[in-house]
Image: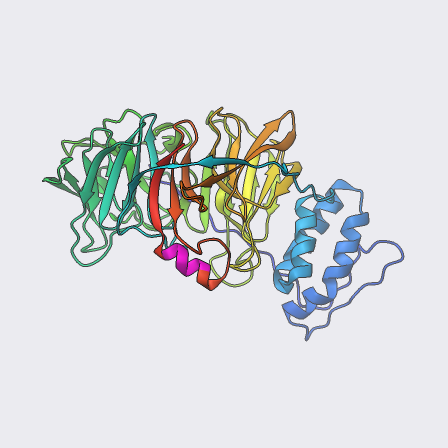
Amino acid sequence: MRVFLPLLLLFALPVSSQTNDATAPGQTTNATTETDDPWTAATKNLPSLYQSWKTEHDPAKRADLADKVVQAAMYVDDDNAHAMGDDVVRDGLPKNELAVPATVTTIKLTPLTTLWDAHTNESDFPPTPVFRRISASRFEAWTPHEGWLFDAKGRTVADVKVPRRDGSGREWFGAFLPDGRWITTDIWDNDKQLNAYTPKGDWKWELPGDKIVAALPKPAASDSDEPITPSIGWARADKTGKKWLVCLGTDYTRGLALVSPDGKFQPLPESADVWQLVYPRSLGPRGFYISMSIKSDDGKLAMDREESGHGVGVGWPSFGFPGNKAGKIIHGGNEQFGFWPGAHAIYIEADGEDVTDPHETWFFDAKGQYEGQVTASYLADTVNGRGLLLKDVQDRVLRVEHNEGLVTVPGIQAFIWPDGSVAMPVAVYDDLKLGFFLRGAGIQGSGDDSRRARAKADIVLAKW
């Protein structure tokens, strides 16, 4: 299977002399000149474009003005421009900041296992360690040099050391099967081979990536002409627990195959739906970092995220909504986006203005209509299979539900250690009542001292 997603096409404002023929009655036009640079032109035109958009009722004209407002806001790129862009995302609806319950349920954790020598690094993407759910009764954690496999009770099934040569491997680090067998890459020659091991760490075989690439189906005529590089982009157990799903490639063109524990492999066709091949809702968005996509649980709808790799448009990704040709350009929209469990409604997380600002999660219905937002970041799904768990700035867990087009926060939880100190969740499995949490002094907050404390804090698997 080859996956190719095009770059977002950004349309800059003209720098030649122009007038704004969409200005609302009674408003003045900020004309630009031949010498105006794009930033100056955008700064002059943004206020009048925004006012014209607010008062326009014709759907086609309003959509055109919305696009112009956002393109101008990209050039200006200050707090005021961000606010105008957010207003366009809401299509002029009032900001609906979800109400959070005043009563917090405090939950005391029981520590099970400390991932010694594993520490968070918030600057990594994805952040280290990597946590994955691979089946109803198995989940795993990986750092570049160690991997852990746990069962549904939080018991350790396998704890393995990863041999390395001259680096740390690509970001997926390793992947278990439920029985403890695992694969990883060496890092000579850009991770271009798989290596398989027993649960005890005995090496079994090596599979070159170029051997898999050579067997992949030939691309359709509309696909990228760029060849698939044999580097192993990511791998994980498939939903049967008997094979690994392996993705090859480094940029837009990717190839996929199923690899069995004996080293044999099955190339996948272009039509393969990778989200249906793994444990439900465990895969998340896939693709190149500026071009990603995800499918709904039933496989019927897809949405994508496209962002410019450099220049104007960085930090202003476009999210393609099913059935909505215009999509949504959300300032700060990050890689945490997708569909609600078992539904076609959508959530999108957005970064704050800088690293000290909290994240905001936006909610839209299946038609792209704005429903609300909350100051919190995506964490996991709820045990009932219908809601989302979000983490707020105080590291509490919000239980968010979506019923008949209404998004609510019916409950909020705070996790603590037996000594009463704060436990900061980093990966939670609500159905198992298990999760990974940070433990240490000074880990709360957004300042440099708190970030350094989090980087040194213990990562502990705990139950409640």
Observer-nearest of 258 and 176? 176
Q: Is residue 286 above or below residue 37?
A: above
In the image, residue 70 above or below residue 423: below
Q: Is residue 90 left or right of residue 198?
A: right
What x and y, as percent, mark residue 415?
Answer: 46, 39
Q: Residue furthest bottom?
A: 35
Q: Position of residue 46 (x, y in %)?
A: 72, 60
Residue 228 belongs to magenta span? no
Q: Pinpoint residue 384: horizontal percent, then vertical percent.
A: 49, 24
Placement of the C terminus among the 4 image quadrants: top left
Q: Decide whether the magenta segment is chiefly helix, strand or loop.
A: helix
Q: Quadrant of the N terminus?
A: top left
Residue visible at 76% across and 50% down in the picture: 53
For the record, the magenta segment spans 450-455
Label count reads 0
Q: Quadrant of residue 417?
A: top left
